[in-house]
Image (cartoon, helix red, strand yellow):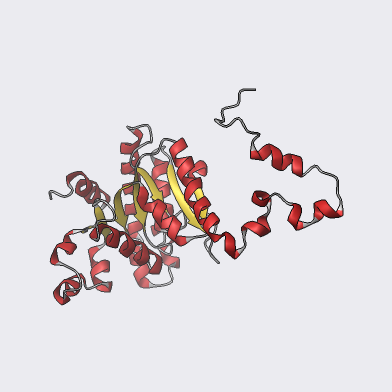
Amino acid sequence: MKDDRLSQFRDAGSDRNTAEKVPDTAQTRAPAYRLAFADEDFMCRDELRPVRLQLELLKPEMILNERGIESTVVLFGGSRIPEPSDKANARTKTLAGLSRYYDEARKFARLVTEKSMASYGREYVVATGGGPGVMEAGNRGAADAGGSSIGLNIVLPHEQAPNEYVTPGLCFNFHYFAIRKMHFLMRAKAICVFPGGFGTLDETFEALTLIQTDRMNRVPFLLFGEEFWRSIINWEALSEAGTISAEDLELFRFVETAEEAIEAINTWPAA
């Protein structure tokens, strides 16, 4: 059998399997005897947090590299925004009205994925948080186009299961919000934000801060739904107060439709 590994050492998986076949004795049953990397209790200790952070950074990065994915288009947005056909069950009238953005996210993701497929799925791959609502719409739109999409899920008391439209081999699960947000932005060629709640706002302002402070390259940054965004954030007040510069208001642009967003990306920052 051909061994594609670069190392000449025996691989860790083989040793793990061998260790599980030893005789059952008081010594082999003791937690101290377990291989450190195969000991789940040990790996979950507080002292191992730096290792877990590194593992969460490495695993998706290695898989995305192996798949040849070079750039992404990120979709942030609310998990509670329903599909229009289900808006009658929305918990508020406002959410029912925002259901139109489910369709816009789905259409936008389809158009982006059609572009992505011209690069054999290496560039402009749709990436979402992998959950319901706008995230589902994004992955669904990519599936409509026959392409792949990424889902960066996270363990929560609810919404733990990824939506059914994420490409299975590109569906990741995280414990740490910080590492998850790094993966959202590391390959991002555009960031599109739909109406949402605390999580969406957190992701939005983290990305804007990185761009504002030159810790991240400036990319097309689009906010879907100007009425929604202006109703919850007084952007101009921040500039007038001097807490941000007037130029910072040019870091993002409002759009309403998928077609408008595609045009904004294609003309950024000239328009």
For residue 222, say whether it is visible: yes
Q: Indicate the position of residue 22 as horizontal and vertical percent values.
A: 82, 43
Q: Residue shown at 87%/51% (left/top)?
A: 25
Which of the pair 129/23 is nearer the observer?
23
Across and down, in percent, residue 120 comes to 37, 32
Q: Residue at x 39, y 57 (%)?
A: 134
Residue 95 position, x and y percent, is: 37, 68
Q: Please, which residue is most extreme toward the bottom here?
A: 241
Quadrant of image for the N terminus: top right
**Residue found 70% across the figure and 49% down from its top:** 35
- Tell whether 91 sits left or right of 155: left
Q: In the image, what residue occupies the spot 40% across and 65% down?
A: 199
Give 242 or 104, whichever is nearer the viewer: 242
Query: Relative to residue 44, is residue 116 depicted above or below?
Result: above
**270 sits to left or right of 52:** left
Give the percent coordinates (x, y) of residue 70: 36, 39
Q: Residue furthest front?
A: 9
Q: How many marks?
A: 0
**Vertical side of 218 occupied by 148: above or below:** above
Can I make out residue 165 in this image? no
Q: In this rendered view, identify the residue nearer to me: 56 or 249.
A: 56
